[in-house]
């Protein structure tokens, strides 16, 4: 394990009961499809035995880009203030950190770079959202295998921008092309994308919310996760919490899943620096509410 970059009592050794992990993917009502305030998410994080909460609401985009599912540009300061107020309220109990989930979309790299430089983010999740109208208008076609190939090509491109710390729900496309989802057919493209991502050093997310989607499995799927491990791609875990009770939902299952796929460490970001933690220590630190899968 590398030297700790985490805040507060990081110079002191952790006991097995110390909270050490974070919810690293959570939203706010500003995105218009999430319920509950960050302070309520923080309270649930405390109950789950987490050390902290990283708030990662959907970033503003220009000219009304996918406007129904993200904060407006004129709400960006409100978002920063909301997270800072929550951080102050919970200081000493839960470490609340400023993050963001930022869309990768070809042609918007300059806009995004400027946005990410405008605040002191601790963690930046990069996302390709194939369900939004702008992506569908530009890239959708009748050949759904080709749509999948485009998605994974964009995933690799997002890592190569250097803008992101981790890539969110990295096989999300399967839920919107489920009738044509065939791993044997798409795996060569996935592996090409993973080769490119591995070369960048960017992490990838294991997103526990996938079990609630059309194809009921975490994102990414087990085969893809094993290929990530073969390439030593670091992993973060996020519940993609849009409701309070979703904070850290499925974490025990996710950690066990990572172990079965060959991982022994999981990661968290602070000040955009990656910290590796032993999976067994994270499991020991959580307040268990899940029944681990067999």
Image: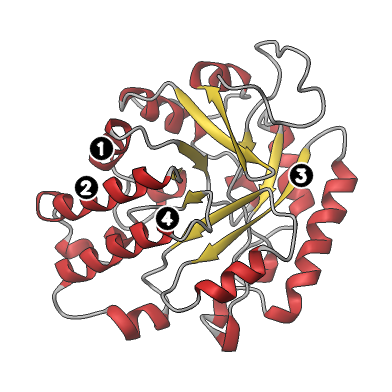
Whichever of callouts 1 and 4 sits on the residue coming sooner in the sequence is: 4
Whether residue 158 sits left or right of residue 184 in the image: it is right
Residues packed near mark 1 inside 10 Å, few (<14), some (14 to 19) or many (20 plus): some
- Could you tell me which secondary element the residue under label 3 belongs to? strand
Q: Nearer the viewer, mark 1 or mark 4?
A: 4
Q: In this picture, is 64 found above or below 262? A: below
Residue on which disc 1 sits: 227
Is there CB contact under 8 Å for labels 2 and 3?
Answer: no
Residue on which disc 2 sits: 191
Residue on which disc 3 sits: 96
> Residue 35 appears in which quarter of the rendering?
bottom right
Q: Nearer the viewer, mark 2 or mark 3?
A: 2
Residues packed near mark 3 inside 10 Å, few (<14), some (14 to 19) or many (20 plus): many
Taking depth in this image into account, of 173 and 43 the one nearest to the observer is 173
Q: CA distance from mark 3 to mark 4?
A: 26 Å
User: What residue do we see at 58% from left, 76% from top?
Assistant: 111
Whether residue 293 sits left or right of residue 242 in the image: it is left
Quadrant where the image shows the N terminus: top right
Whichever of callouts 1 and 2 sits on the residue coming sooner in the sequence is: 2
Which dot marks residue 159? 4
> Residue 44 appears in which quarter of the rendering?
top right
- Could you tell me which secondary element the residue under label 4 belongs to? helix
Q: CA distance from mark 1 to mark 2?
A: 7 Å
Q: CA distance from mark 3 to mark 1?
A: 32 Å
Is there CB contact under 8 Å for labels 3 and 1?
Answer: no
Is there CB contact under 8 Å for labels 1 and 2?
Answer: yes
Q: CA distance from mark 1 to mark 4?
A: 17 Å
Q: In this picture, is 252 found above or below 135? A: above
User: What residue do we see at 44% from left, 36% from top?
Assistant: 234
Whichever of callouts 2 and 3 sits on the residue coming sooner in the sequence is: 3
Whichever of callouts 2 and 4 sits on the residue coming sooner in the sequence is: 4
Q: Position of residue 260 (x, y in %)?
A: 32, 24
């Amino acid at each position: 394990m590398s030297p700790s970059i985490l805040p507060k009592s990081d110079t002191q050794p952790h006991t097995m009961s110390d909270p050490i992990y974070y919810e690293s993917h959570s939203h706010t009502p500003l995105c218009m499809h999430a319920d509950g305030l960050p302070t309520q998410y923080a309270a649930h994080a405390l109950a789950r035995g987490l050390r902290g909460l990283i708030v990662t609401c959907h970033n503003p985009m220009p000219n009304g880009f996918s406007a129904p599912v993200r904060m407006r540009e004129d709400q960006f300061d409100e978002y920063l203030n909301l997270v800072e107020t929550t951080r102050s309220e919970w200081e000493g109990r839960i470490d609340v950190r400023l993050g963001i989930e930022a869309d990768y979309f070809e042609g918007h790299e300059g806009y995004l770079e400027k946005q990410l430089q405008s605040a002191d983010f601790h963690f930046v999740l990069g996302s390709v959202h194939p369900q939004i109208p702008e992506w569908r208008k530009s890239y959708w076609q009748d050949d759904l295998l080709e749509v999948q190939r485009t998605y994974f090509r964009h995933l690799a491109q997002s890592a190569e921008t250097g803008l992101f710390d981790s890539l969110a729900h990295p096989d999300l496309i399967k839920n919107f092309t489920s009738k044509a989802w065939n791993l044997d057919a798409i795996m060569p493209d996935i592996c090409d994308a993973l080769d490119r991502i591995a070369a960048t050093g960017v992490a990838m997310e294991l997103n526990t919310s996938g079990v609630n989607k059309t194809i009921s499995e975490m994102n990414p799927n087990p085969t893809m996760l094993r290929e990530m491990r073969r390439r030593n791609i670091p992993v973060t875990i996020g519940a993609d919490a849009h409701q309070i009770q979703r904070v850290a939902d499925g974490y025990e299952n996710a950690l066990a899943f990572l172990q079965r796929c060959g991982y022994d460490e999981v990661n968290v970001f602070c000040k955009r620096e990656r910290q590796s933690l032993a999976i067994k220590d994270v499991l020991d630190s959580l307040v268990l509410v899940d029944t681990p899968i067999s």
